[in-house]
Amino acid sequence: WNTTGIARHVVVAGMVPEMQRRGIHILGHGCTGRGNDQIRFELASQMLDPKIQVYAPWRDDAFLQQFGGRKEMIAYCQQHDIPVKATLSKPYSTDANVLGLTHEAGELESLETPASRVDPGMGVFPAEAPADAQRVTIRFDKGVPTAIDGERLGAFDLVVAANRIGGAHGIGIGLHAVENRFVGIKSRGIYEAPGLELLSRSYEFLLQLILDRRSRRLYDQVSTWIAEQIYQGYWFDPATQACRDFVDRFSQLGTGTVTVSLYKGNVLYESIVDAPNSLYSEEAASMEDVGEFDHRDSQGFVGVLGVSARALHTAGQISG
């Protein structure tokens, strides 16, 4: 999970109205000229208020002459007693929000540096998780997680609880990925998102029941496209909003109670109940002589499919 992209849009959504209230029209950000965040901050803020101008120190010649990189900035902060978490002994940077952590830069830029070089901030590595599994029950109402283990929670508190539970079992902790930045550079990061991983894997089990084959394919395609839009700074874009409305249509079916088992980084299926929109029928799926499905009905269906299969062979299009 790359949680940084959506976090930037949340910051802008809260910041721009306050800037307008105070009559401020200049946005300053410390994003590097090689990264995605500069694009996210600037596109998102200017979509909400075209009058906003930007000051970016990493594109300021005077700033670049004084601060060539991370080491110089840390030294400056230490010299002037400016409290920052970054130190020369911690050779990577961490970007954090309630949804997850992203560890990048420094030693992590080397592909020879393992993910274990990072000190997890939201849990433990799977190998260090408890030897005993933990069962967790999550309630979804119209696509929204609303309760954990029977306790109804607001969105923020529910994510915090999911982070705590998932992180303790190494869920979504220490995940390595090399991404393609919007500016065309590949970068490497180590990610943590225990709550999102727990909730999404649980919701995935529910989606398997409620969406037919065509709907699921379309849902995955549009969801992936929305994720790319967020990554590139287009959350407020009209196309993204339209696609969100599309996904919400399917989300209205996402009601059910999902129980999973957490064990050393794995989210394992246990059960699903109270899912009124489930398309799954135990009788229809059974290999036994039960239910309304007549095995003999498949004869004509298979015969029709066989027409094209034989035609492929006759046309010499099948090899092997």
Image (cartoon, rainbow, N blue to C red):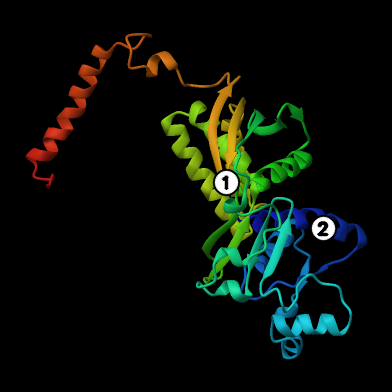
- Left or right of residue 270, residue 28 in this image: right
Observer-side mark, 1 or 2, equals 1
At label 2, counting other C-alpha atoms closer than 10 Å, the crowd grade (few under 14, some 14-19, many 20 or more) is some
Q: Is residue 163 above or below residue 180?
A: above
Residue at point 57%, 52% (across, down): 127
Q: Is residue 25 above or below residue 64?
A: above
- Badge 1 is on which residue? 264
- The quarter holding residue 86 reads bottom right
- Left or right of residue 201, residue 46 in this image: right
- Left or right of residue 25, residue 2 in this image: left
Q: How far apart are the alpha carbons under marks 1 and 2?
A: 39 Å
**In the image, what residue type sits under mark 2?**
Met
At label 1, counting other C-alpha atoms closer than 10 Å, the crowd grade (few under 14, some 14-19, many 20 or more) is many
SS class, disc 2: helix
Q: Which mark is residue 142?
A: none
Q: Is residue 179 visible?
A: yes
Q: Is residue 153 above or below residue 113?
A: above
Q: Is residue 62 above or below residue 171?
A: below
Single out the residue that lies furthest toward the front.
131
| Image spot of residue 19 (x, y percent) | 86, 61
Residue at point 86%, 73% (across, down): 83
- Sequence-wise, the earlier of marks 1 and 2 is 2
Q: Is residue 244 visible?
A: no
